Image: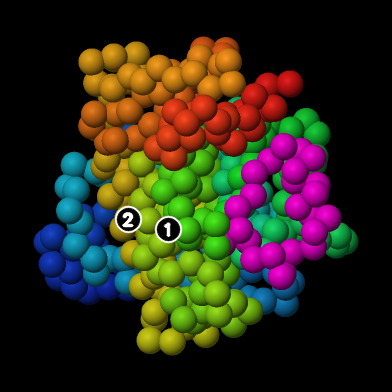
C-alpha cells in the first residue's frame, strides 16, 4: 500500500482528547490511530475515513466538522467484539479545489479496497458516494450498489451535485455496476419518471413504507451488495434533527441501525458511507449519536459475518427443494445465522429471504427470483 499520510489532515481528532479520557473498554481506547508514517495497516479489519466536503451540495459551504462530531459520540461507546481491529485514519485534507479533495479521497478508498479492508466513510455531501464507487471502478471490479435515501438523486443539473450524482453513476460508460438497489424513498418527493427509468434499467427500488413493513427483506439486498451509501434524510426528522431538509416520515432510528447491521453482516460489502450530517444543526447531539450507533451496529454485524459457513459445506445448511411453475429450485438455510439463499437455473446461489421460500413453496414465483432472471437476459 502506498504512503497515504499526505492525503490526511495533520491533526487527528484523538489528539484533541486528554490521556485517560476513555475507559479501557470504550472504543476510544481500543481503536488504532493513523498518526504517523509508522502506522501498520495490516492488522486493521475496518478502517474509518472522514471527509467533510460539502461542496457537492453547495459550493459555498465550508468543510464540515461532522466526521469529528460523530467520532466524539462513537469513541464513548463500549466495544463488545475485541477480536475486530478498527483503525481510524482521520480526515481527508481539504484540497485547493473540489477536484483535489475528491481525488485524494478516491485514492485512499482505492488503496484500502485493494488491501481488502472494510471502509466506513463519514461524509460530507451525498455525492461523495461517487468516490466510493470509483474506488471499485478503478480496479475494474463489477459491483452491486445499495443506497438509502428519501430522495433519488437523479435531477438534471449542470455538473455533478448531491442531487444529481446518481445519473452519472448509473449511466456513465463503461459501467461497472451490475445492480443498483434504492431503499427508503418517499414517493411524494420523487418524480414518477425517475422510477420508470430505474425500472427500465432493471434496478430495484423500495418505498419507505414497504421497507418498514418487511425490513428483513432488505437483508438479502445488502448481503448481495458491495457498497452501501446512507443519507440521513432516510431517517425521520425526530431521530435525525440535524437534517433541516428532512421529513416527518422515514426510518426510525432503530430501523436505520438494523440496516447498518445487515450491511455489516454482508459477506461482500466492503464500503459503507454515511452522508448529510450537519453538526451545527444537531440538537443535543442526537444525530451524531444516531450515526455512531449505526456504526456500532455495523461492527456488530461484521462480527456475525465472520461466523458464516461456506455455501459448499452442505452439513452447515438445511436444503429445501421446491417446484414452482415448472421450475425446480433449491433453497438453502444457514444453520448458523438462519439466512437464506436460492439457486438460479444457472446454478448460481443468490441471497433471499424466508418470504421468498414461502412464496415458492406455495407454487408462485418470488419477485426476487424473477428479477434475477431478467438481469441475466
**Residue, disc 2:** 297
The residues colored magenta run 184-208
Q: Examine the structure image and report whether residue 270 is included in the region drawn in magenta.
A: no
Residue found 32% across the figure and 71% down from its top: 73
In-image side of 165 versus 157 (left or right): left
The answer to whether 225 is drawn above or below residue 75 in the figure is above
- Look at the image and name its color scheme: rainbow
Badge 2 density bin: few <14, some 14–19, many ≥20, Cα 10 Å:
many
The answer to whether 334 is drawn above or below residue 304 in the figure is above
Residue 244: image location, x then y, percent: 59, 82
Residue found 80% across the figure and 59% down from its top: 192
Q: State the CA–CA distance, disc 2 to disc 1.
A: 21 Å
Closest to the observer: 261 or 195? 195
First of labels 2, 1 by sequence position = 1
**Residue, disc 1:** 90
In-image side of 79 versus 338 (left or right): left
Residue at the farthest left position: 24
Residue 92: image location, x then y, percent: 53, 58
Label 1: element kind: strand
Quadrant for residue 278, please give it: bottom right
Quadrant for residue 118, please give it: top left
Residue 1: image location, x then y, percent: 46, 33
Label 2: element kind: helix
Q: Examine the structure image and report whether residue 205 is included in the region drawn in magenta.
A: yes
Amino acid at each position: 500500500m502506498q504512503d497515504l499520510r499526505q492525503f490526511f489532515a495533520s491533526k487527528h481528532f484523538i489528539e484533541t482528547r486528554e490521556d485517560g479520557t476513555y475507559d479501557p473498554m470504550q472504543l476510544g481506547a481500543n481503536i488504532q490511530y493513523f498518526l504517523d508514517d509508522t502506522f501498520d495497516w495490516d492488522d486493521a479489519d475496518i478502517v474509518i475515513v472522514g471527509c467533510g466536503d460539502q461542496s457537492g451540495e453547495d459550493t459555498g459551504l465550508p468543510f464540515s466538522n461532522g466526521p469529528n462530531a460523530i467520532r466524539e459520540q462513537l469513541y464513548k461507546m463500549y466495544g463488545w467484539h475485541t477480536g475486530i481491529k478498527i483503525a481510524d485514519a482521520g480526515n481527508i485534507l481539504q484540497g485547493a479545489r473540489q477536484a483535489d479533495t475528491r481525488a485524494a479521497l478516491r485514492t485512499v478508498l482505492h488503496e484500502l479496497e485493494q488491501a481488502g479492508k472494510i471502509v466506513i466513510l463519514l461524509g460530507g455531501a451525498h455525492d461523495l458516494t461517487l468516490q466510493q464507487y470509483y474506488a471499485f471502478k478503478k480496479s475494474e471490479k463489477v459491483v452491486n450498489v445499495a443506497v438509502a435515501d428519501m430522495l433519488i438523486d437523479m435531477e438534471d443539473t449542470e455538473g455533478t451535485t448531491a442531487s444529481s450524482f446518481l445519473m452519472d453513476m448509473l449511466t456513465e460508460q463503461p459501467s461497472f455496476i451490475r445492480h443498483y438497489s434504492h431503499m427508503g424513498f418517499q414517493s411524494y418527493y420523487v418524480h414518477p419518471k425517475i422510477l420508470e427509468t430505474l425500472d427500465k434499467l432493471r434496478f430495484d427500488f423500495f418505498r419507505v413504507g414497504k421497507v418498514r413493513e418487511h425490513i428483513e427483506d432488505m437483508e438479502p439486498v445488502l448481503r448481495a451488495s458491495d457498497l452501501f451509501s446512507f443519507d440521513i434524510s432516510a431517517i425521520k426528522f425526530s431521530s435525525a434533527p440535524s437534517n433541516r431538509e428532512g421529513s416527518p416520515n422515514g426510518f426510525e432510528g432503530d430501523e436505520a441501525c438494523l440496516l447498518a447491521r445487515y450491511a455489516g453482516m454482508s459477506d461482500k460489502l466492503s464500503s459503507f458511507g454515511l452522508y448529510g450530517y450537519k453538526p451545527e444543526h444537531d440538537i443535543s447531539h442526537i444525530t451524531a449519536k444516531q450515526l455512531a450507533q449505526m456504526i456500532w451496529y455495523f461492527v456488530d454485524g461484521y462480527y456475525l459475518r465472520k461466523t458464516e459457513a461456506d455455501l459448499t459445506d452442505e452439513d452447515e445448511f438445511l436444503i429445501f427443494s421446491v417446484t414452482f411453475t415448472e421450475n425446480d429450485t433449491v433453497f438453502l438455510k444457514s444453520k448458523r445465522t438462519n439466512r437464506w439463499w436460492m439457486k438460479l437455473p444457472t446454478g448460481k446461489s443468490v441471497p433471499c429471504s424466508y418470504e421468498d421460500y414461502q412464496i415458492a413453496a406455495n407454487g408462485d414465483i418470488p419477485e426476487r427470483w424473477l428479477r434475477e432472471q431478467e438481469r441475466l437476459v
